Amino acid sequence: MKLLFAHGWGFDRHVWDPLVALLPDVEHAVDDRGYFGAPSAPEIEGPCLAVTHSFGTMRVLTDPPSGLVGLVAINGFERFTALPGKPGVAVRVVDRMLRRFDSDPRGVLAEFRKACGSQDAFGEIDPEPLRADLLRLRDAQAPSPKVPVAVLQGGQDPILPSAMRAAVFAGSEVHRIDHEAGGHLLPLENPELCAQAVRGAVGALA
């Protein structure tokens, strides 16, 4: 079985570097949406376990590889903004980001990354996919997963409200792992915990 890693909004393939280093024996591919350079969408043949972070979960569920057999969603969700009866981030938060984005895309991105807990510098950006995906974060709803899901959430996540974290993938076959001290960047904050979840999912699917 192959792993497919998919990052979230405002980050790139390198968010997975610490986790990939802990899984040297597992074949994998890493996608890149192209926020900071050329995009990469690897073709996956055969059975595949997707390992996603944040908005990467929506991206994979919206366009899953044909061989998808499981999902490890780290700080993940199927919808970002709230709807009546469905908790999420307030739409006004994303609208505020969109209003500023055209005039100051780097500022919006830097502010978001800082809110996530990242102070790392970043290079040149491509505003087009970043803005397109902000609209998806505001408006889109990914299909419910049709495969087993392991969900890792951080109890101190500054981006996802607690009610939202508790409600993600309601009604689906889900194994939930809560890291009470964790934030929104679990692949960087605690790659060991993420590696355990991935190995557990691979073992359950074997």
Image: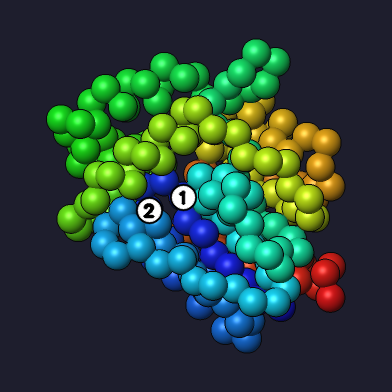
**Residue 192, x across and y down, in percent:** 60, 66
Residue 134 located left or right of residue 71: left
Look at the numbered discs 2 and 1 and tell me whether their residues touch, using CB distance below 8 Å.
yes
Packing grade of label 2 (10 A; few <14, some 14-19, many >=20) is many
Farthest top residue?
Answer: 84
Residue identifier under label 1: 8
Residue 140 located left or right of residue 125: right
Residue identifier under label 2: 11
Packing grade of label 1 (10 A; few <14, some 14-19, many >=20) is many
Residue at image x 22%, y 52%? 125
Residue 14 located left or right of residue 149: left
In the structure shown, which secondary structural element does the residue marked by tag 2 occupy?
loop
* The one of 163 and 49 positioned closer to us in this rendering: 49
**Residue 130, x across and y down, in percent:** 33, 44
Amino acid under disc 1 = Gly
Q: Kindly report the distance in space between the C-alpha atoms of the residues bearing marks 2 and 1.
A: 6 Å
Residue at image x 55%, y 37%? 156
In the structure shown, which secondary structural element does the residue marked by tag 1 occupy?
loop
Residue at image x 84%, y 75%? 206
Residue 71, quarter of picture = bottom right
Farthest left residue?
Answer: 103
Q: Is residue 104 visible?
A: yes
* The one of 129 and 183 positioned closer to us in this rendering: 129
Number of numbered markers: 2
Task: Indicate the quadrant containing the N terminus: top left, top right, bottom left or bottom right.
Answer: bottom right
Residue 148 higher or lower than 203, as above or below: above
**Residue 70, x across and y down, in percent:** 74, 61
Residue 147 higher or lower than 96, as above or below: below
Amino acid under disc 2 = Phe
Q: Is residue 180 visible?
A: no
Residue at image x 68%, y 65%? 66
